[in-house]
Amino acid sequence: MKPIVLVEDNPDDEALTLRALRRNRIKNEVVVARDGAEALDILIGSDAPGTPSPVVPAVVLLDLKLPKIGGIEVLRRLRSNPRNRLTPVVILTSSREEQDLLAGYELGANSYIRKPVDFEQFSEAVRYLGLYWLVLNEPPPTWSGTKPW
């Protein structure tokens, strides 16, 4: 079972997301990155000695307002990397800025979800997110970077 990568700098939102995943019986391991640089190290890898291999997730839950490297730039770099070009990325953010919505989709986000303020609504959103991306969605085969067509 592939892990979920949660990219979230707010400890309260991280805890709420983890709680909502557990509450909805989503059993995938969750790898948390607390800033954009850490997310890229986890998903793309680093040249630093002793760095673990990049994670191949079932889905990336990406906040936009992140320290070090913003979420839009993280998405841009993921999509420019052949190994991550097809990785499902769901922007999960409190941003209501239309430019963030447009930039996310233009850079290849698969979905854009505004975090509900109420925990019950948030938990329900996470339940649907898990149901779709982890159960119903048919992911692409592992991609080597060469086009099969």
Image (tube, rainbow, N blue to C red):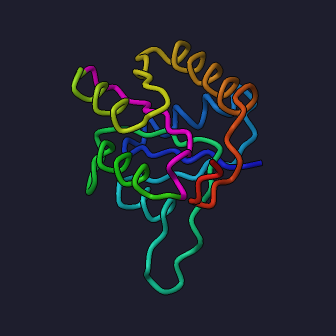
The main secondary structure of the magenta stretch is loop
Give left or right: position of 137 versus 123: right
Q: Residue at x 71, y 47 (%)?
A: 141
Q: Residue at x 55, y 45 (%)?
A: 86
Q: Residue at x 50, y 49 (%)?
A: 85
Where 52 sits versus 9, above or below? below
Where 14 sits versus 115, above or below? below
**Magenta segment boundaries in residue numbering:** 83-96
Where 122 sits versus 35, above or below? above
Position in image of residue 101 (x %, y %)? 31, 25
Position in image of residue 98 (x %, y %)? 24, 20
Q: Residue at x 42, y 37 (%)?
A: 108
Q: Nearer the viewer, residue 41 or 127?
A: 41
Position in image of residue 28 (x %, y %)? 72, 43
Give left or right: position of 14 versus 146: left
Residue 92 is covered by the magenta coloring:
yes
Residue 141 is covered by the magenta coloring:
no
User: Residue 48, located in which quarter of the rendered image?
Assistant: bottom left
